[in-house]
Each structure stands twice: as structure tokens, then as C-alpha cells.
Amino acid sequence: GVVRGWDDPRLPTLRGLRRRGVPPAAIRDFCERVGVARRETRVNADLLEYCVRAKLEESAGRRLAVLDPLKVVILNYPADKTELVEVPNHPMIRKERVISFSREIFISREDFREDPEDKNFHRLAPGRVVRLRFSYLIECSGVKKNEEGEIEELSCTFRENIR
């Protein structure tokens, strides 16, 4: 690419920063920290990133995402039931949001191993009990594979009274 104007997000201009999603308060905070000097000075770009992160820490909500999903079917959970669970929106700010828990959930594929050789692997494996974040304890009771031998689905049971 060719740069077409001063508002291109690749340029370190105010308009470029705004198009990149940098909040105005972060730019003002950065300018206050740098200050004005008579001599030529250099400022590390990490300071700008720190100011952006500090402002976004206050306002941006946190979400969980599963990038490489593995389907988990909880066998002893009712198929028609969906439970709404209140979870914190941010670790430091007391706001909550609601997520749903049902018979079918998805976990990250890297959180499961069929044969965990490493003794430091404390995640889900056949016969092993783990706690789902903001939810119940589950135990893996079966693994379903496709024709290529890749794990397609896990069968688990949950512990009802422990949350």
C-alpha cells in the first residue's frame, strides 16, 4: 500500500491514531506525560501504548472467546434447560453480564488431551474432573472421533451440587 492521506491508520498522526481506535483521553494523557521541552527528545512508543491500555482498561468490557472450539455434551444435564449465569464483566470494575450454560458447550481444543503425559497438565482429560469458569465441575467420560481420528466431541457429566 500507498498512503492516501494524513488519516491513514498506519501513520503516527492524530487522525491516524483516532482511526486506529485510540481514545482521545489516551492521547491527552500521553501528551501530559511527555510534556514540552526546549531540546529534541525521543519518547518510547511503549508509553503511548501504556496510555492507550490504561484508558481502555477502564472502559472496554472483557469477553471470553474460543478460537479453536471442541464440542462438549454434558450427558446428565437436561437437554431443554438453559441456565443464565451472572459473571463479572471486568476483574476490577463491579459490573456484571449474563452468559448461558446449557447441555452443549464449547471449550478450547488445547484445554483437552486424550492422553496427558505431562504431569503439569491440569486441564480436561478422560476421567479427570475440572471446573468450568463461572460454572460447574465436569468430568470427561467419553471421546468421539471422526474418520481421520481427530477428536470431534467430548461426553462429560457435571456435578450438580458443586458450583
Image: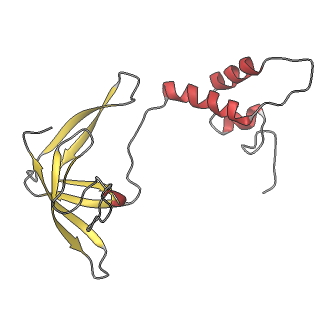
> On the rendered structure, is 128 left or right of 116?
left
Q: Residue furthest front?
A: 119
Q: Nearer the viewer, residue 23 or 36?
A: 36
Q: Is residue 134 above or below residue 55?
A: below
Q: Residue at x 75, y 43 (%)?
A: 8
Q: State which quadrant residue 71 falls in.
A: bottom left
Q: Is residue 146 above or below residue 118?
A: below
Q: Is residue 126 above or below residue 57?
A: below
**Residue 4 screen position, x and y as percent:** 81, 48
> How many numbered discs sit on the rendered protein?
0
> On the rendered structure, is 121 left or right of 46?
left
Q: Nearer the viewer, residue 107 or 39?
A: 39
Q: State which quadrant residue 24 falls in.
A: top right
Q: Quadrant of the C terminus?
A: top left
Q: Residue at x 41, y 24 (%)?
A: 92
> On the rendered structure, is 83 left or right of 116?
left
Q: Is residue 17 above or below residue 146?
A: above
**Residue 154 screen position, x and y as percent:** 21, 63
**Residue 127 screen position, x and y as percent:** 15, 60
**Residue 20 screen position, x and y as percent:** 66, 39
